[in-house]
Image (tube, helix red, strand yellow):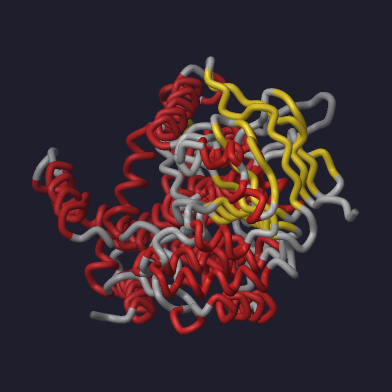
Amino acid sequence: MIRETYLNALIMALLLGIPLWAHVAGQPFTITLATKVAILGLAGVGLNIALGLGGMVSLGHAVFFGIGGYAMGILAHHAQTYTPLMEAPLLIEGTKFMPAIWLVAVVVSAVVALAIGALSLRTGGVYFIMITLAFGQMFYYFAISWPAYGGEDGLSIYVRNEFPGLNTLVPIQFFAIAFVALSLGLILSHLIARSRFGLALGAARQNSERVQTVGLDPMRVKLVAFVISGAITGLAGALFADLNRFVAPTMFSWHLSGELIIFIILGGIGRLFGPVVGAGLFILLEHFLGGLSEYWLIYVGAILLGVVLFARGGLIGALSGREVAHD
Amino acid sequence: MTEPILRTESITKYFGAVKASQDVSLELRPGEIHALIGPNGAGKSTLIKQIAGNLTPDAGRIWFDGRDVTRLGTVARARAGLGRTFQISSLAMEYTVLQNVVLGALGRDGGVMRFLLPAMKDKALVAEAEAALDRVGLIDLKSTRTADLSHGQRRQLEVAVALTLRPKAFLMDEPMAGLGAGGSKRLTGFLDTLRAEAPILLVEHDMDAVFALADRISVLVYGEVIATGTAAEIRANRDVRTAYLGEDA
């Protein structure tokens, strides 16, 4: 058994080391794969706050991923066509400036998460799963039927957005942005898990009656967690769209919501690095098995089955044992 | 006479045609242990749920600490100072014993929207929690996972969590259940001293404990309080003997 902290450090070292090596060796595609792992890992870190810490099985987190994606797509589209988003009552122009795009992605995702959470948290269990799925489908079909922004075909952004001091078109530099974003997401997730808020959230997952009895409102705690969760996944969506320089309704699809859950289960539910390991494994499988067969997801299914049956703590749990209580 | 901390005013609750509570008026006065007894199905649980805020009475009012709390939910009543323990332990089972009690201290403190500093390193919360564990005799088990505790220990833990809330009144639903003779005796001794801190409304099946502890006893039968009085008065009451102790008068 490896201590979880060492294991986490090893994962970070690999995620940083492999693209650096690829940069030196002149293999930009490997850097792109690592960037994808970092970004999808970040989306999973967001979901893990709702699902792992708060026990809210959201099958609609693609909503926030897609909102982040479209925040980038819409703003950059207006910037590249030199048309303002709106003129009256006040003039809003598009932008290619990443920090501004991220801010919009995070704020809009958070507001939508507040609305979806407030409605969905009235239910529990399987109904919560279904209502979040329903919201996901609404956003998906809305995006398909919105011709102004490409409808089903999506939006292409010709040049990657800008970040001061960096040339974002150089793969290793864009990777650096994604890696820092992931690191900040992980730090935030780690702090939240141990904080007063995290203690109440974990208790709300286990027993909401207990939380009420000490005079705290479990629904309020869960709703705030859902908002934070959605905001982080939204940021990941903006980065993902920038990685591909393309955004399409598939970012809202429930397959993506499902994949985010798969990352977490593969890596270990509620474990800090679970989503990162899960995303890494998923993308490696996609890359290597996808080359062998169109039906590579069959193997993912088999692995998922194995994890659920024999390694409940996911890969992190299998390598480092049961989570220790932090006190 | 001093104002009661908790008062139910003719509360009535129906489930369909069944009257689960019928015109129940109870008072919990400062410094007392008021025991609520009654045969199974008498409506004790329904009454407790109305006092705690899980159920709203169809008629009547509930006063707590000078306020009408009839329409308030469980969270608001806990915040108002009602410290509850459950008939079937209701704890965060994956947490350690200490984490459960720190949660109680956090509930009292109220500052839950803090995201950055570790809760288990918050000296004030942990000190409060450890003091409570020490009082119920669980301090040596503070790092044990709650799921690994015995039923009796879980009971003690619930009392410890309630202590951290520094409530104005305790609402205890069968705290002796599953304790065994020794544990039951120890808890009886503890509750005996606790009444000076805050009065206790005690639902209990352990009659030895009830008669040893209670300043006053109310007897609930078919949702109705048929008698309220001291232990001696209740023992001598003919209605109670007929209805509850199962004797022909």
Residue A96 visible (yes or no):
no
Q: Residue at x 67, y 50 (%)?
A: B233
Tell whether A236 sits left or right of B171.
Answer: left
Q: Quadrant of residue B170?
A: bottom right
Q: Above or below — where is A192 with respect to B29? A: below
Q: Position of residue A8 (x, y in %)?
A: 37, 74
Residue A260 visible (yes or no):
yes
Tell whether A250 sits left or right of B217.
Answer: left
Give A116 or B27, whichever is nearer the viewer: B27
Q: Residue at x 48, y 42 (%)?
A: A65
Give A323 or A63, whichever is nearer the viewer: A323
Give B55 or B247, whichever is nearer the viewer: B247
Q: Residue at x 47, y 34 (%)?
A: B41
**Which residue in the rendered view is the most extreme toward the left?**
A292
Could you tell me how many numbered marks the image carries? 0
Q: Position of residue A63 (x, y in %)?
A: 49, 35
Q: Residue at x 40, y 75 (%)?
A: B144
**Which residue in the rendered view is the most extreme toward the bottom?**
B140
Q: Position of residue A109 (x, y in %)?
A: 59, 41
Give A262 or A178, whichever is nearer the viewer: A262
Picture quarter with the N terminus of chain B: bottom right
Tell whether B125 sits left or right of A175.
Answer: right
Q: Position of residue B109 (x, y in %)?
A: 72, 65
**Which residue in the rendered view is the most extreme toward the front?**
B249
Q: Above or below — where is A194 with respect to B227? A: below
